[in-house]
Structure formats: structure tokens, C-alpha cells
């Protein structure tokens, strides 16, 4: 995505100005339809009785800087942004 590449930012950073705590950390399959992925998250929120305002999903593909993954992932996986987000989240969806 050119906008994230030009700004060296994650897609998520285009929409928020600061840190946000994830309710759920979500990983996905790149071959999955975006609409199917969204339906799965909506179904998950519904099954857990969460309103759209209550449930925040930290989607790895949108929260990592895809053009600079080496920085986000680093040399120690335990210090990666993904691992830190999983530690902050109340749950993980795979």
C-alpha cells in the first residue's frame, strides 16, 4: 500500500493517533476474503456479547509495518510488536 510505504507506518496508524489496547489479537490467512474475515470477527463479538464499541481487534496484518517488518519483528520474537499485543489482549483469535 503506497500510503503506508511513503509514511513508513502500519495501516492502523493511518486511523489512530496514539496507542490503543487490543481486546483481542487476531491473526489471519492471507488467502481469506476480507469480508469473510470481518464476518468472523463480528460473529466472535456477537458470541461474546460485545458491542462494536467494546471489542477492539488488533489485526496483525494491519498493525505491523509491512514495509519494515524487520523493525517490527526484530531479532527477538518475544519483543516483537505482535507478541507484545498478544500479551496486552484479553484473548487471541487465530
Image (cartoon, helix red, strand yellow):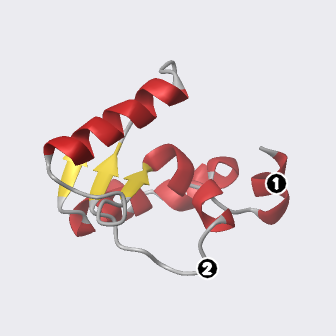
Q: Which residue is mark 2?
A: 17
Q: Which residue is mark 1?
A: 3
- Residue pictured at 15% horizontal, 41% vertical: 47
Q: Residue furthest bottom?
A: 18
- Residue pictured at 70% horizontal, 49% vertical: 67
- Residue pictured at 74% horizontal, 62% vertical: 8
- Quarter holding residue 89: bottom left
Q: Secondary structure at mark 1?
A: helix
Q: Residues within 10 Å of mark 2 (few under 14, many from 20)?
A: few
Question: Where does the image place residue 84, in percent across and percent down from the top left?
Answer: 32, 66
Q: Is residue 45 left or right of residue 80?
A: left
- Quarter holding residue 81: bottom left
- Residue pictured at 33% horizontal, 63% vertical: 85
Question: Where does the image place residue 19, in percent across and percent down from the top left?
Answer: 47, 78
Name above or below for residue 84 compared with residue 11: below
Residue 94 seen in render: no
In which quadrant will I find the N terminus? Answer: top right
* Residue 49, disc: none
Q: CA distance from mark 1 to mark 2?
A: 16 Å
In which quadrant will I find the C terminus? Answer: top left
Q: Is residue 85 left or right of residue 33?
A: left
Name above or below for residue 25 compared with residue 81: above
Residue 31 seen in render: yes
Q: Secondary structure at mark 2?
A: loop
Amino acid at each position: 500500500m503506497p500510503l503506508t510505504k511513503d509514511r513508513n507506518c502500519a495501516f492502523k496508524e493511518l486511523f489512530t493517533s496514539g496507542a490503543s489496547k487490543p481486546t483481542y489479537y487476531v491473526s489471519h490467512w492471507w488467502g481469506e476474503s476480507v469480508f469473510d474475515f470481518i464476518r468472523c470477527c463480528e460473529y466472535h463479538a456477537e458470541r461474546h456479547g460485545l458491542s462494536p464499541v467494546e471489542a477492539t481487534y488488533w489485526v496483525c496484518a494491519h498493525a505491523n509495518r509491512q514495509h519494515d517488518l524487520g523493525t517490527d519483528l526484530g531479532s527477538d520474537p518475544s519483543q516483537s510488536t505482535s507478541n507484545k499485543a498478544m500479551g496486552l489482549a484479553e484473548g487471541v483469535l487465530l
